[in-house]
Image (cartoon, rainbow, N blue to C red):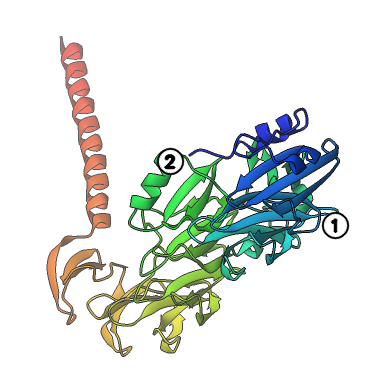
Amino acid sequence: MGLPTFRNIVLLSLLLRSVWTFAQTKPEPWLKEYDECREYGDVYVVKKINKPCRAYETFLTNKQGRKLTPAYRDIGDFEEGLAEFVPMAHSREGQGLHGFIDKQGKVVIEPRYVSTDRFYNGRTWVIYRAEPHYGLSYIDKTGKELYRIPIEHFANDYLIRDAEVKHQCNNDTKEDVLWWRNGEPLVLNFNFTPFVEREIRQAKGIVPFNYLGKFGVIDQNFILKVPVALDEIDVNYTYSGQGLTRVRYGDKYGYINPLTGDLVVPCDYTDTRKPTNGLFWVKKNGKWGCIDKTGTLRIPHLYDEATGFTAENRSAVAINGKFGHIDRSGTVRTPLTYDFASYYNHGISMVRVDDKYGYIDTTGRFVTQLIYDEAFPFDHPTTHVERSWLRFELTQDGKEEFIGFSYKLKGLFIIVGTLVFIWLNSLFYRIRDEVRWGKRRMS
């Protein structure tokens, strides 16, 4: 990824006086009163420098030298019929204000931005104050906002107090807003090398990218949808799915749209689970609740534990150590009275009370009583259970088939067998030694 050489521009601008060439202009006599000039068809941008890097005036004129604008601090290059300009008056914060004029000198977009750039394909980006941050939006040639980055959701980044607003000597339209991270410049707007631009254009969707250990998201139209502030993007879909991709900012999680890159769910949650049946379990203030793919809260944050919703439209949940089940509407379908309740599978859930296990169906009816010492959920058409040291294969209608002794009993047999072996071995050697001793005495 190629970044703007802002740092070099800033350093050089403090030392060098920028030069505008007269190569494209005709030697009109009235041009001699100006120090710099650029020609754009039937108009000129001319500049008079009174004190280098401190006092200068810039005008838009026609070919006869008639001024089409009042004195501005700077006028940038014309692109798609518009040029960036900076008036003489600064903002109340002492910064230059940036807008756009046309070739008639008419102000098309009022100067109210901290930074901007030339138009490309009918749009450009603008940076503005959005206390306590700087914000970034994309606008069209009328000034209409096309997209605004949700900068308010990134509380620790792009703060005004940490920023430097720099421009090139004598050229206020060659500016940017900079933050420094480990000696490297960080910006809100990003430029890319031609090779990376080609890759972005050829991508089938949004493109996450990494800079200085942080992630941003840009789309095929080169609109930055999420600033370079994310700490993680779940590109492998370990915790994502069903229309949303999980992202992390600091120690909190949220979701973006994997097709558009829009931040759908702000990073407000301390934990999340992989979505099921269109619902996302998310944790806030130590409790689990459910949102849908629009970020709307569907089930309040009430639960200490929660599992995904299965085909039976059930989720196992717990409050204060007691388990039960709810459906996707949040309605309690199994009272939270069990010491443990598993997810449903094949229409059956495993439950426990006082260290005994049993199974219930989706109505809460017991398929088996609470008689098992060990049990497993119905992850397959049958499952294994243990009672009275015996193991059984259990069917979904509660029928048992003996398949052997419990692992605990087998372990006990092994221990007893080992002890018996040791005792017999010891007995053998003791008897052998007594026989040998008796023979010696007789001899």
Q: Position of residue 412 (x, y in %)?
A: 26, 51
For disc 1, the marked residue is 89
Query: Residue 171 got which mark?
Result: none
Residue at coordinates 74% horizontally, 51% vertically from top-left? 65
Closer-to-camera residue (178/411): 178
Q: Position of residue 268 (x, y in %)?
A: 59, 66
Q: Is residue 433 above or below residue 385?
A: above
Label 2 CA crowd tier, 10 Å (few <14, some 14–19, many 20+): few
For disc 2, the marked residue is 194
Res 147 quadrant in image? bottom right
Gap in angstroms between the C-alphas marked 1 and 2: 37 Å
Q: In which quarter of the image is the C terminus?
A: top left
Res 100 quadrant in image? bottom right
Q: Is residue 106 above or below residue 21?
A: below
Closer-to-camera residue (347/4): 4
Closer-to-camera residue (82/303): 82
Residue at coordinates 17% horizontally, 68% vertically from top-left? 392
